[in-house]
């Protein structure tokens, strides 16, 4: 039975999302990514309605992928669709194995899992944050929270993180030029506070999803600038290459420098991939 927010979500799925999501596209994107990636990051919305059947299916796919590459996940608003999903800690129950932190002393015991989750890999420090919280119908905004932001500040000061390139994962947009009312409905409510927490960084990547359109921008900090990049969905059938199924690829050198960013986008036939530049949206202060 579909109740409360799931009713509106189900209507959305039938009328719009279900029409453009293709399982065969998702499989093709995963197969292609696994052949070229060292680490796979998933920035949320792994499910549509946070049903157990969806979680089971996603877990099976990620388990299979994890035989080839390491995986890190963060929850999206669709993964924390109802207060009951939040209370029952469904996201960490299914995906906790992908959240084994190298600095567990900083992780909070959140209903969405142990965040911040930090993985120290070569010249990179992957820092996963949770912004998924249950919201009423027609609201999909996210929230990091003061406790998690305080933990993030401590993580960034840790010497093992400070000497590496930070790659921050979050679902909701950390850079948002839309009016405040729209941000409160569909953005990251405490985005300015996240910006302040990241302000000491001289370099870094901030990767997110939610908007499902590939674009990149630069966020200025007092010490330098961060590259902020939005991913689209891995299963979307859409005429716009900035939206259509694919994945973003990031190359980071041994010194922690960002050597390249590109998108691998499934073509309209669904049989081949095209290397595509990600459109830039300027600089955010």
Image (cartoon, rainbow, N blue to C red):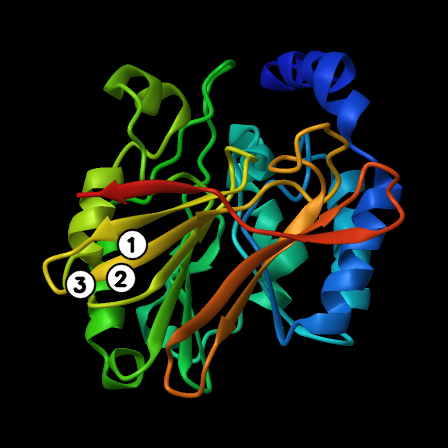
Badge 2 crowding class, 10 Å Cα cut-off, few under 14, some 14 to 19, many 20 or more, is many
Task: Establish if 70 lies above or below 23.
Answer: below
Q: CA distance from mark 3 to mark 2?
A: 18 Å
Badge 1 crowding class, 10 Å Cα cut-off, few under 14, some 14 to 19, many 20 or more, is many
| Residue 226 x/y as whole percent | 29, 58
Could you say whether the residue bearing mark 3 is in a helix, strand or loop?
loop
Could you say whether the residue bearing mark 2 is in a helix, strand or loop?
helix
Q: Is residue 235 left or right of residue 208?
A: right
Residue drawn where x is 50% and y is 14% of the image:
138
Which residue is most to the left? 222
Specify the quadrant of the image occupied by residue 163: bottom left
Residue drawn where x is 45% and y is 24% of the image:
135
Q: Which mark is residue 252?
A: none
- Report the mark closest to the observer, 3 or 1: 3
Name the foreground residue: 142 vs 36: 36
Specify the quadrant of the image occupied by residue 81: top right
Residue 147 visible? The answer is no
Task: Establish if 102 lies above or below 11.
Answer: below
Could you say whether the residue bearing mark 1 is in a helix, strand or loop?
helix
Residue that mark 3 sits on: 224
Badge 3 crowding class, 10 Å Cα cut-off, few under 14, some 14 to 19, many 20 or more, is some
Task: Establish if 41 lies above or below 238.
Answer: below
Q: Which mark is residue 148?
A: 1
Q: Which mark is residue 152?
A: 2
């Amino acid at each position: 039975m579909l109740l409360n927010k799931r009713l509106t979500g189900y209507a959305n799925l039938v009328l719009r999302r279900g029409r453009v999501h293709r399982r065969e596209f998702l499989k093709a994107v995963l197969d292609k990514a696994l052949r070229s990636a060292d680490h796979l990051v998933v920035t949320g919305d792994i499910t549509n309605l946070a049903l157990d059947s969806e979680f089971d299916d996603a877990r099976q796919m990620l388990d299979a992928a994890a035989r080839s590459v390491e995986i890190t996940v963060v929850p999206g608003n669709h993964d924390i669709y109802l207060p009951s999903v939040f209370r029952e800690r469904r996201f960490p129950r299914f995906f906790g194995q992908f959240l084994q932190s190298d600095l567990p002393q900083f992780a909070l015991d959140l209903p969405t899992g142990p965040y911040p989750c930090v993985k120290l890999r070569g010249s990179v420090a992957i820092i996963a944050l949770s912004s998924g919280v249950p919201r009423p119908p027609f609201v999909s905004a996210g929230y990091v929270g003061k406790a998690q932001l305080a933990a993030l500040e401590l993580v960034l000061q840790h010497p093992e993180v400070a000497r590496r390139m930070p790659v921050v994962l979050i679902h909701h947009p950390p850079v948002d030029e839309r009016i405040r009312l729209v941000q409160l409905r569909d953005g990251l409510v405490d985005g300015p506070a996240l910006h302040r927490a990241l302000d000491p960084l001289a370099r870094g990547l901030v990767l997110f999803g939610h908007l499902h359109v590939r674009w990149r921008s630069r966020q200025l900090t007092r010490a330098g600038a961060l590259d902020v990049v939005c991913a689209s969905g891995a299963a979307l059938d859409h005429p716009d290459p900035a939206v259509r199924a694919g994945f973003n690829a990031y190359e980071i050198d041994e010194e922690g420098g960002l050597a390249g960013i590109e998108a691998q986008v499934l073509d309209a036939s669904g049989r081949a991939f095209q290397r595509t530049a990600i459109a830039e949206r300027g600089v955010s202060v």
